[in-house]
Image (tube, rainbow, N blue to C red):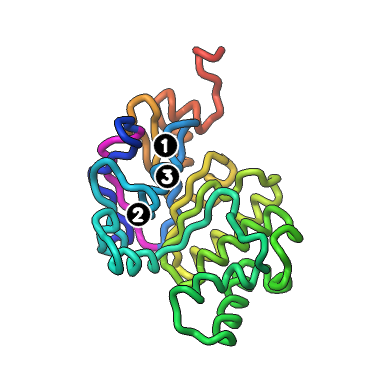
Amino acid sequence: MNPIEVKNLTVGYGNKVLLQNLNFSVADGEVFIILGGSGCGKSSLLKNLFGLYQPLAGDVWIEGMNITRSIGQQRQDIMTHFGVMYQQGALFGSMTLLENVRLFMEEYTELDDDEMDLLARCKLDLVGLLPFANYMPNEISGGMQKRAAIARAMALDPKILFLDEPSAGLDPITSADLDQTILDLAKNLGITFVIVSHELASIYAIADRVIMLDKDTKRIIAQGDPRVLRDTSTDPKVHQFFNRVMSKEAA
C-alpha cells in the first residue's frame, strides 16, 4: 500500500476549477515533487492533499485512510500521520525554536515536560539546529527558519512530510544545505516527502519522481524522473520548463 493515493481529484474554489481528474500515488520513502508554471495550482493541490482545503471532487488516501471524507476524531487521527512545512516556515515569533517544536507535542501527546524537551531537542538535532534551541525565529537566518519548520513538522514522528516551496527565497548555498537535510531525512528515517517546488537545482538534486501540472489543460502533463523528462520529453511545455527555454510566444 502506498502512503498516499490520489483518485479522481478535482481542485478549485467554488465554480473555478484549477485541476481536474488527477490520479497518482506516492511511494513509501519517495521524494515526490509537484511542479509546473505559475498559477497552475501546485500549492492548492498540496493543501488538498493534507486536508487544509476540500477538493471539488475525488479522494485523497493517507496511509490507507480517506482524509477527504473524514471528520472529527478520525480526521485528527489521520493528521498525526503527516507533518507540514508552509512556504515561509510559519514559526511562531514569540516562541523559541524549542517551544515551536514542542507545540504539537503539547496538543497531541501526554508526555511530561522533560520528555517533550528531549524529543524536541532530538528533532532540532536532526536538522542541525540543536545549538539554537533557545533562539527566537528572528535571531536566525531564513534557511535556519526553514529547517526549524521541518523539525516542528516532525514533532509527532510522521512518516510523511508536505513541504511548500522550501527553497523559496534562499541563496543557492543555503538551498543546497536544505536539500541535503531533506535527502538525509528521507534516507535515514525513511520519511516520504511531497514537495512543491519550481527550483530546478533542488528538483534535480532531491527528486525521485515529479509530476508536472499544466494551467491550460488543468491536468498532469508529465511525470517521472526529472532528468529523464528534461532530456527526452517531446512536449514543448515540459521541454521549456526543464530546459528554461523561452516560448515562441514570449520571443
Q: Against 28, is 210 above or below?
A: above
Count residues near mark 2 (Cα–Cα under 10 Å), then give few for <14, some for 14-19, many for 20+: many
Q: Is residue 76 left or right of residue 59?
A: right
> SS at mark 2?
strand
Q: Earlier in the sequence, mark 2 or mark 1?
A: 2
Q: Which residue is mark 1?
A: 41
Q: CA distance from mark 2 to mark 1?
A: 18 Å
Q: Position of residue 111 (x, y in %)?
A: 49, 84
Q: Against 125, is 230 above or below?
A: above
Count residues near mark 3 (Cα–Cα under 10 Å), then give few for <14, some for 14-19, many for 20+: many
Are the residues at dot 3 and dot 1 in contact (C-beta closer than 8 Å)? Answer: no
Where residue 172 sits, quadrant-wise, is: top right
Q: Position of residue 70 (x, y in %)?
A: 26, 60
* Mark 1 residue type: Gly
Q: Is residue 45 left or right of residue 204?
A: left
Q: Earlier in the sequence, mark 3 or mark 1?
A: 1
Q: Residue 111: which numbered mark, if any?
A: none
Callout in the foreground (3, 1):
1
Query: Measuring 57% from the left and 50% from the top, which residue is drawn there?
Result: 166
Q: Which residue is mark 2?
A: 26
Q: Which residue is mark 3?
A: 210
Q: Position of residue 14 (x, y in %)?
A: 31, 35
Query: Measuring 44% from the left and 74% from the top, which residue is drawn there?
Result: 108
Q: CA distance from mark 3 to mark 1?
A: 15 Å
> SS at mark 3?
strand
Count residues near mark 1 (Cα–Cα under 10 Å), then give few for <14, some for 14-19, many for 20+: many
